[in-house]
Image (cartoon, rainbow, N blue to C red):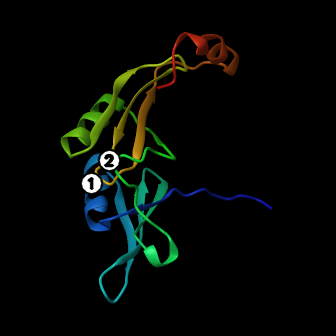
Amino acid sequence: MAVHELFPYLCVADAQAAVAFYIQVFEASEKFRLVEPGGRIGHVELDLGGSTLMLCEEFPEVDIHAPQPGRGHSHTLHLHVDDADAVVARAVAAGAQLAMAPRDHFYGERSGTVIDPFGHRWNIGHSIETLTPEEMQRRYPAEPCG
């Protein structure tokens, strides 16, 4: 078996609003969408700088649900950008909740975390130095990952 690609596939309550948010904040472009006769968006693909993000609306009939507020997060999407501060600020201005302001981290990255209006957690960062895994491990105990 060979894995060729891995696509994040997010469920949201309002795919149209999510597409608009991701285009505004992450400068995504829509590749295509599939809409059911009743109007429910069954599938959308967005391009984020050469990476594909897939979205769908809820399908409770097959146990596919959007995140529920206050229930925590089972995943984080890590988006590597040129300027984390600017993207985090743009996300917050567009309605995301700031979970962690951008700051420099022990692993050689400056990053911050937002919760988008659809309940998904995004860690947005950029490189500030290149480190070996050994150096990251040496520094690891000095700072919590938060």
Residue behind mark 1: 21
Question: Residue 116: image x %, image y %?
Answer: 32, 47
Residue behind mark 2: 116
Q: Residue at x 28, y 51 (%)?
A: 117
Q: Is residue 91 left or right of residue 35?
A: left
Q: Is residue 38 left or right of residue 135?
A: left
- Three-letter amino acid code at the position of disc 2: Asp
Label 2: element kind: loop
Q: Residue at x 28, y 47 (%)?
A: 25
- Three-letter amino acid code at the position of disc 1: Phe
Q: For the N terminus, which image quadrant?
A: bottom right
Q: Residue at x 77, y 59 (%)?
A: 2
Q: Residue at x 27, y 67 (%)?
A: 16
Comparing 121 with 69, the one in front is 69
Counting residues from the start of the chain, the first of labels 1 and 2 encountered is 1
Q: Tell me where residue 85 sits by quadrant.
A: top left
Quick one: which residue is furthest to the left in this view?
A: 93
**Which callout, 1 or 2, points to the residue nearer the camera?**
2
Comparing 5 with 37, the one in front is 37
Looking at the rendered structure, the number of numbered marks drawn on it comes to 2
Task: Tell me if label 1 and label 2 are in contact, CB under 8 Å.
Answer: yes
Q: Tell me where residue 138 sits by quadrant.
A: top right
The residues tagged by marks 1 and 2 sit, at their Cα atoms, a distance apart of 9 Å
Question: Residue 53: image x %, image y %?
Answer: 46, 58
Question: Residue 101: image x %, image y %?
Answer: 32, 26
* Disc 2 packing (10 Å; few <14; some 14–19; many ≥20): some
Quick one: which residue is furthest to the right in this view?
A: 1
